Image: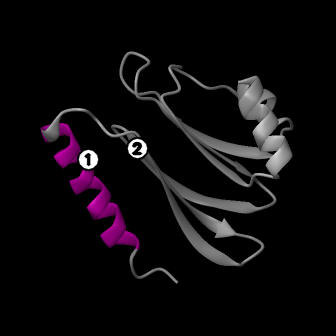
């Protein structure tokens, strides 16, 4: 966690996607400590038994959150990149190992893409 906090602070990061969190729940204090301040938003999907969890975090001054969709092994976040004034759909994926689970996940992601393809 210390190294990740260092990278976020050093690079001026606006959006971070983390896979394999191994944490069942994320609270504000943990996210604030990781980012270094409280000007952030986040969405966490816990995975199964702590494995396969994904976390998406963003700086609120750089990314204006609109919505998200969570599923088994993924989080899709929609928002506006404030500096570029454009809608962004950011996908954070931790793929399942089994072929059948991957097929289910990719079908769900394809449906999300189709639902957002006409956004400008």
Q: Position of residue 103 (x, y in %)?
A: 17, 48
| Residue on which disc 2 sits | 74
Front residue (pair 36, 114)? 36
Residue 113 point in image, percent of width and height: 35, 67
Q: Which quadrant does the N terminus fall into?
A: top right
Q: Residue at x 80, y 50 (%)?
A: 11
Give the Cα distance between marks 2 and 1.
8 Å
Q: Secondary structure at mark 2?
A: strand
User: Which quarter of the picture shows residue 63?
Assistant: bottom right
Q: Residue 107 at x, y = what percent?
A: 21, 55
Q: Secondary structure at mark 1?
A: helix
* Residue 80: mark: none
Snapshot quadrant of residue 70: top left
Q: Main secondary structure of the magenta part?
A: helix
Of the numbered discs 2 and 1, the one sitting upstream in the chain is: 2
Q: Is 106 contained in the magenta span? A: yes
Label 1 neighbour load within 10 Å: few <14, some 14-19, many 20+: many
Q: Which residue: 44% across, 18% down?
A: 50
Circles 2 and 1, Cβ within 8 Å, touching? The answer is yes
Q: Position of residue 59 (x, y in %)?
A: 76, 52
Q: Residue furthest left?
A: 100
Residue 62 is left or right of residue 98, and the answer is right
Residue found at x 76% / y 51%: 13
Give left or right: position of 112 versus 64: left
> In this rendering, would 107 be left or right of 115?
left
Residues drawn in magenta:
100-116
Is 17 in front, or is 76? 17
Residue topped by disc 1:
105
Q: Residue at x 15, y 39 (%)?
A: 99
Residue 67, compared with residue 37, is above or below; it is below
């Amino acid at each position: 966690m210390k190294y990740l906090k260092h990278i976020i602070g050093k690079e001026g990061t606006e959006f971070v996607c983390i896979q394999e969190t191994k944490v069942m729940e994320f609270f504000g204090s943990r996210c604030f400590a990781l980012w270094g301040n409280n000007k952030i938003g986040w969405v966490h999907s816990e995975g199964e038994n702590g494995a396969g969890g994904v976390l998406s975090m963003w700086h609120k001054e750089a990314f204006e959150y609109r919505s998200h969709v969570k599923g088994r092994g993924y989080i899709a976040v929609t928002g506006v990149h404030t500096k570029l004034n454009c809608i962004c759909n950011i996908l954070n994926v931790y793929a399942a190992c089994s072929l059948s689970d991957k097929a289910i996940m990719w079908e769900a992601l394809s449906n999300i893409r189709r639902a957002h393809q006409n956004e400008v």
